[in-house]
Image (spheres, helix red, strand yellow):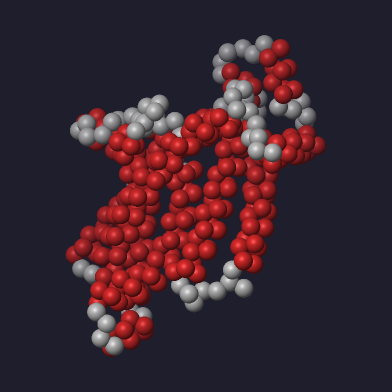
Amino acid sequence: MFRFVLRRLLQMVLAFFGTTLIVYALMFAGQGDPIQALAGERPVTPAQRAYLTEKFHLDRTGVGGFLYRYLDYLKNLLQGDLGQSLTGRSIGDILAAAWPVTVKLALIAMAVTILFGVTAGVLAGIRRASLFDNATLVLTLLVLGIPTIVLAPLAQYLLGVRWPVFPPTAGADPDLWALLLPGIVLGSLSLATALRLTRTSVAENLRADYVRTARSKGLARRRIIGVHVLRNSLIPVITFLGVELGNLMSGAIITEGVFNIPGVGFNLFRGIRTEDGPLVVGIVSVLVVVYLVANLVVDVLYAVLDPRIRYE
């Protein structure tokens, strides 16, 4: 296990540098005039342009200039400095203010996914081909067929404006109640996927040989399902949830934009829209770390859930 974790850590380092290099190249390769994009329609004085150009090394062009900027970014990143956005604000301060909001939103979405998606999936797998199973199939197909860009404003209008059950927007400092509706919207696709995945896994394990052996030994159905079936069925589900946690952290761009939530996704979208390369690369670098750590935790949990799994 120690060698496996060490090998994965080395792979994480390579994946991190490779991903940041690709994102850095994509962000700066097709960049037009980031200074003018930041100012909008307002004119930029020659003094302001010269200052920002020198500060962010925009005067260095070509492959040499790109490598210089990237290596300079890595040097600062390894020292814990994410740099500054084109607005002059520290990216670390931006993330410090936005991260708690996104974490709350992602945890609400994950809680909704686990409480309703996994639970309903277990019941649907146990009651295979029943009315409940068929109803969940129709509902999940319906949810999966509606993209977030449609579901978010629809939920905002129906439950925030037409029937004011939830606040229509979260605001600058949202509490848990203001984040509940966007959390449900964000977790809806994950809920549908987790439900179908759990249902399939439970149904397959119920037909396995070890279940028939346990029944022949006289074990109670509750013990067979609660101890043996669920433990084996949760392996693919935990894999999905671990990866999905990273998706929820970074994939909240539309949800945070619709509900006016000042989180990581909102700032990432703002950076892309204004062509703020340092801000985009800084946020993506942190999100890459979240993905890699989540995947490592999921792989380690494999051995906890299934002792048959061994890593060389």
Tell me if residue 147 can be seen: no
Q: Is residue 14 above or below residue 255?
A: below
Is 173 or 33 nearer to us in this picture? 173
Residue 207 image offset from top left, x and y in percent:
33, 79
Residue 271 image offset from top left, x and y in percent:
55, 31
Q: Is residue 75 found left or right of 276 in the rendered image?
A: right
For the point 32% across and 66% down, the residue is 199
Query: What number of labels is visible?
Result: 0
Q: Is residue 285 above or below residue 298?
A: above
For the point 30% across and 77% down, the residue is 224
Q: Is residue 139 above or below residue 4?
A: above
Residue 304 image offset from top left, x and y in percent:
47, 68
For the point 59% across and 68% down, the residue is 1
Q: Is residue 47 found left or right of 39 in the rendered image?
A: right
Quadrant containing the C terminus in the rendered view: bottom right
Q: Is residue 245 found left or right of 279 in the rendered image?
A: left
Is 294 or 275 nearer to us in this picture? 294
As drawn, which residue projects farthest toward the right? 64
Residue 34 image offset from top left, x and y in percent:
64, 25
